[in-house]
């Protein structure tokens, strides 16, 4: 190999690496942790009145407000509401999202789904379940799932303005929620209240929305240097890399 060819190769590789680093720096991550600000509510216990020999074995509670031992507020949905923001070309296509009928409840309680992504309705219980929903922008579905069976819903192709509820008509205490958007910039807070959204564009003002099952849109909540509106919206201009919003306190009065 001649010196000239070797130098050309080094120059091309160097500019390639610079371009890659620049592209990575243009992306932003937003993260934070929702915290219940007040005395956590005592979970309401549910008494199964169907299939008691199976469902009665499990401790079932109403999951409208789920607070961890450290005050973390679980099952809060956050999504990008700004339009026209596309993910990076190398963003992986998600596989099937799964809602499982397990221990006579839905798992997970709140699930993120992207338009066109298959939704698998699974049943890990030894009794039959019914999984039904009536989205606003997509066809309704009502699926009977036999014990230890599964079905797939493939017709959810339009984003939903807000999360929609999933129920089981056989066991009416069961419910879950689906957050359906046409982009991957969506998250649900975990058991400790934390969430993270990756791959966002830096240096551009972006609008997000925040929703929780009982409170619905979380309004008048301090998020970083701003406050959410009546429809749970807040706007931020993200810097490249990590943008940590820290503890986002949600007052107990929001759930009354």
Image (tube, rainbow, N blue to C red):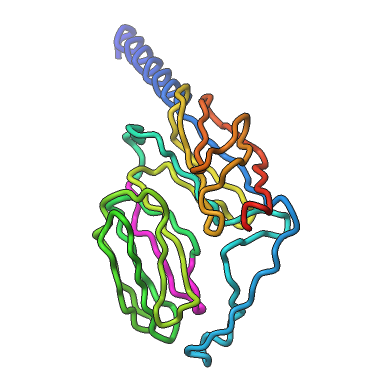
Residue farthest to the bottom, as pictured: 53
Task: Give the percent coordinates (x, y) of residue 148.
Answer: 38, 81
Closer to the camera in the image, 184 or 230: 230
Magenta run includes residue 122: no
Residue at image x 70%, y 64%? Answer: 41
Q: Is residue 229 above or below residue 140?
A: above
User: Which quarter of the image is occupied by the N terminus?
Assistant: top left
53 relative to 154, above or below: below
* Main secondary structure along the magenta-highlighted residues: strand
Q: Position of residue 27 (x, y in %)?
A: 45, 29
Query: In this image, 130 relative to 40: left or right?
Result: left
Name which residue lies at 38% across and 84% down.
128
Residue 206 % position (x, y): 45, 30
Q: Is residue 103 left or right of residue 139?
A: right
Direction right: furthest residue: 39
Q: Is residue 174 above or below residue 37?
A: below
> Extreme top residue here?
4
**Above or below, 137 relative to 87:** below
> Residue 118, located in which quarter of the rendered image?
bottom left
Q: Nearer the viewer, residue 23 or 103?
A: 103
Which sits in the foreground, 161 or 25? 161
Total numbered circles: 0
Report the residue at 35% width, 51% height from top.
Answer: 160
Which span of residues is magenta-colored? 93-107
Q: Residue at x 60, y 73 (%)?
A: 61
Which quadrant is the C terminus positioned in? bottom right
């Amino acid at each position: 190999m001649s010196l000239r060819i070797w130098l050309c190769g080094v120059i091309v590789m160097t500019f390639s690496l610079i371009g890659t680093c620049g592209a990575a720096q243009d992306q932003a991550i937003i993260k934070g942790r929702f915290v219940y600000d007040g005395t956590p509510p005592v979970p309401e216990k549910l008494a199964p009145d169907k299939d008691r020999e199976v469902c009665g074995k499990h401790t079932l509670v109403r999951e409208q407000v789920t607070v961890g031992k450290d005050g973390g507020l679980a099952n809060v949905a956050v999504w990008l509401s700004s339009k026209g923001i596309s993910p990076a070309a190398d963003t992986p296509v998600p596989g099937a999202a799964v809602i499982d009928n397990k221990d006579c409840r839905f798992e997970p309680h709140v699930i993120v789904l992207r338009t066109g992504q298959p939704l698998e309705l699974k049943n890990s219980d030894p009794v039959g379940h019914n999984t039904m929903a009536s989205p606003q922008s997509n066809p309704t579905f009502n699926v009977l799932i036999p014990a230890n069976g599964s079905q797939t819903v493939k017709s959810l192709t339009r984003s939903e303005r807000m999360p929609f509820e999933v129920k089981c008509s056989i066991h009416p205490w069961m419910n879950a929620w689906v957050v359906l958007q046409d982009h991957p910039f969506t998250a649900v807070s975990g058991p400790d209240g934390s969430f993270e959204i990756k791959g966002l564009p830096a240096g551009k003002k972006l609008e997000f929305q925040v929703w929780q099952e009982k409170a619905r849109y979380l309004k008048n909540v301090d998020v970083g240097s701003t406050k959410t509106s009546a429809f749970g919206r807040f706007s931020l201009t993200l810097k490249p890399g990590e943008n940590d919003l820290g503890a986002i306190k949600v007052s107990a009065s929001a759930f009354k």
